[in-house]
Amino acid sequence: MRCKTNQAIMRLSAKSIKALQVLLEEHTGREYSNEEAQQAGLAIMRFVVAKHQRHIKPTTNGNEVNKGENSDDIEQKQTRGGSR
Protein backbone atom coordinates (compact mmCIF):
# COMPACT_ATOMS: atom_id res chain seq x y z
CA MET A 1 0.00 0.00 0.00
CA ARG A 2 1.31 3.44 -0.75
CA CYS A 3 0.28 6.81 0.58
CA LYS A 4 0.93 10.27 -0.82
CA THR A 5 1.49 12.33 2.30
CA ASN A 6 0.21 15.66 1.02
CA GLN A 7 -2.99 14.20 -0.46
CA ALA A 8 -3.44 11.16 1.83
CA ILE A 9 -4.28 8.87 -1.07
CA MET A 10 -3.95 5.19 -0.25
CA ARG A 11 -3.89 2.42 -2.86
CA LEU A 12 -3.82 -1.33 -2.43
CA SER A 13 -1.15 -3.23 -4.33
CA ALA A 14 -2.12 -5.28 -7.39
CA LYS A 15 -1.44 -8.47 -5.41
CA SER A 16 -3.71 -7.31 -2.58
CA ILE A 17 -6.46 -6.39 -5.04
CA LYS A 18 -6.35 -9.85 -6.64
CA ALA A 19 -6.56 -11.54 -3.23
CA LEU A 20 -9.42 -9.26 -2.21
CA GLN A 21 -11.29 -9.95 -5.45
CA VAL A 22 -11.18 -13.68 -4.67
CA LEU A 23 -12.49 -13.11 -1.13
CA LEU A 24 -15.22 -10.73 -2.27
CA GLU A 25 -16.41 -13.13 -4.96
CA GLU A 26 -16.48 -16.03 -2.45
CA HIS A 27 -18.57 -14.00 -0.01
CA THR A 28 -20.83 -12.06 -2.37
CA GLY A 29 -21.03 -14.26 -5.46
CA ARG A 30 -20.18 -11.37 -7.75
CA GLU A 31 -17.01 -10.35 -9.55
CA TYR A 32 -15.41 -7.02 -8.66
CA SER A 33 -13.35 -4.91 -11.05
CA ASN A 34 -9.92 -3.75 -9.89
CA GLU A 35 -11.31 -0.31 -9.00
CA GLU A 36 -14.35 -1.76 -7.18
CA ALA A 37 -12.04 -4.04 -5.17
CA GLN A 38 -9.77 -1.06 -4.48
CA GLN A 39 -12.70 0.95 -3.10
CA ALA A 40 -14.05 -2.01 -1.11
CA GLY A 41 -10.61 -2.70 0.37
CA LEU A 42 -10.14 0.89 1.46
CA ALA A 43 -13.63 0.95 2.99
CA ILE A 44 -12.83 -2.24 4.92
CA MET A 45 -9.59 -0.71 6.17
CA ARG A 46 -11.37 2.47 7.32
CA PHE A 47 -13.93 0.33 9.15
CA VAL A 48 -11.26 -1.76 10.90
CA VAL A 49 -9.30 1.33 11.96
CA ALA A 50 -12.45 3.03 13.28
CA LYS A 51 -13.45 -0.10 15.19
CA HIS A 52 -9.95 -0.44 16.64
CA GLN A 53 -9.91 3.19 17.75
CA ARG A 54 -13.18 2.71 19.64
CA HIS A 55 -11.54 -0.02 21.76
CA ILE A 56 -8.25 1.74 22.47
CA LYS A 57 -7.97 4.36 25.18
CA PRO A 58 -4.89 6.62 25.24
CA THR A 59 -3.21 7.11 28.61
CA THR A 60 -1.58 10.27 29.89
CA ASN A 61 1.91 8.95 29.03
CA GLY A 62 0.96 8.30 25.39
CA ASN A 63 0.70 4.52 25.66
CA GLU A 64 -2.48 2.76 24.66
CA VAL A 65 -4.54 0.62 27.00
CA ASN A 66 -7.08 -1.86 25.67
CA LYS A 67 -10.42 -0.99 27.24
CA GLY A 68 -12.44 -3.60 25.33
CA GLU A 69 -12.65 -7.35 25.43
CA ASN A 70 -11.35 -9.53 22.67
CA SER A 71 -13.76 -11.67 20.68
CA ASP A 72 -12.51 -14.91 22.29
CA ASP A 73 -13.42 -13.62 25.76
CA ILE A 74 -16.86 -12.54 24.59
CA GLU A 75 -17.53 -15.86 22.84
CA GLN A 76 -16.49 -17.82 25.94
CA LYS A 77 -18.82 -15.75 28.14
CA GLN A 78 -21.71 -16.25 25.73
CA THR A 79 -21.23 -20.02 25.58
CA ARG A 80 -21.15 -20.19 29.38
CA GLY A 81 -24.38 -18.22 29.61
CA GLY A 82 -22.80 -14.94 30.64
CA SER A 83 -23.74 -11.63 29.09
CA ARG A 84 -21.72 -8.73 27.87
Image (cartoon, helix red, strand yellow):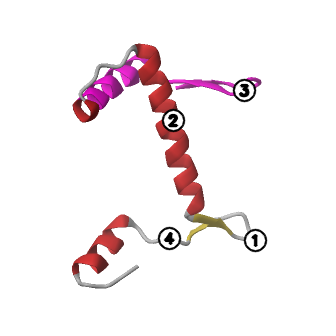
The number of numbered badges drawn on the structure is 4
Q: Which residues are magenta?
A: 1-25
Mark before the other along the chain sequence, 2 or 3: 3
Q: Earlier in the sequence, mark 3 or mark 4?
A: 3
Q: Earlier in the sequence, mark 4 or mark 2?
A: 2
Judging by the rendered image, the residue that carries numbered circle 4 is: 68
Residue 44 locus on image (x, y percent): 47, 38
Q: Is residue 13 above or below residue 40?
A: above
Tag 2 residue: 43
Q: Residue at x 35, y 28 (%)?
A: 20
Q: Residues within 10 Å of mark 3 (few under 14, many from 20)?
A: few
> Which residue sits at x=40%, y=67%?
70
Image vertical order of residue 83 relative to residue 57, above or below: below
Check whether the beta carbons of the residues at disc 3 and disc 4 lie within 8 A of each other: no
Q: Which quarter shows the C terminus?
A: bottom left
Q: Residues within 10 Å of mark 1 (few under 14, many from 20)?
A: few
Task: State the CA–CA distance, disc 1 to disc 4.
Answer: 18 Å
Q: From the image, tell me which residue sits under label 1.
A: 60
Q: Nearer the viewer, mark 4 or mark 2?
A: 2
User: Label 3, label 4: how many angstroms apart (C-alpha)?
Assistant: 31 Å
Residue located beneath label 3 in the image? 5
Left or right of 45? Residue 10 is: right
Give the amino acid type for the residue marked by disc 3 in the picture: Thr
Kindly identify the amino acid type of the residue bearing the numbered disc 1: Thr
